[in-house]
Amino acid sequence: MKSMEEMLKAAQQAAETIQKQMTEMQGKLDAMEVEGVAGGGLVKIRATAKGRIIGVAIDDSLMDKAEKGILEDLIAAAFNDARAKADQVSNAEMTKMQGGMGLTPGFKLPGM
């Protein structure tokens, strides 16, 4: 039977391993890209899987003062589409990582 000291040391090592994997996962998610699209491709927003916006592309046909309100709506819609895709990729990657660590899917790791 393991001593309390051995169990505490093993728990500390496991926590350090999880922390290292979480840090690596955050870096991986920030390197993965998703694209949110609105208006049939008239507005596109590129973001990382962590949700950091990388770029915005707006079709020239929307560069008219009369289209300002539509453009604003499409930018918001494209952003929300990119955010939803980032969340999907992030959740899928976290599920894979948790499965690899033997954790129950949906288990909330501290700091996530």
Image (cartoon, rainbow, N blue to C red):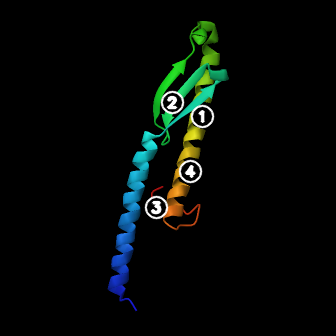
Q: Label 2 belongs to which residue?
A: 46
CA separation in Å, label 4 and label 2: 18 Å
- Callout 1: helix, strand or loop? helix
- Callout 4: helix, strand or loop? helix
Badge 4: residue crowd in 10 Å (few <14, some 14–19, many ≥20): some
CA separation in Å, label 1 and label 4: 16 Å
Q: Nearer the viewer, mark 4 or mark 3?
A: 4
Do the residues bearing badges 4 and 2 touch, measured as CB atoms within 8 Å?
no
Badge 2: residue crowd in 10 Å (few <14, some 14–19, many ≥20): many
Q: Nearer the viewer, mark 1 or mark 4?
A: 4
Q: Label 4 belongs to which residue?
A: 91
Q: Is residue 86 above or below residue 13?
A: above
- Identify which residue is drawn at 61% across, 27% down: 37
Q: Earlier in the sequence, mark 3 or mark 2?
A: 2
CA separation in Å, label 1 and label 2: 11 Å
CA separation in Å, label 4 and label 3: 15 Å
Q: Label 3 belongs to which residue?
A: 110
Q: Residue furthest bottom?
A: 1
Q: Label 1 belongs to which residue?
A: 80
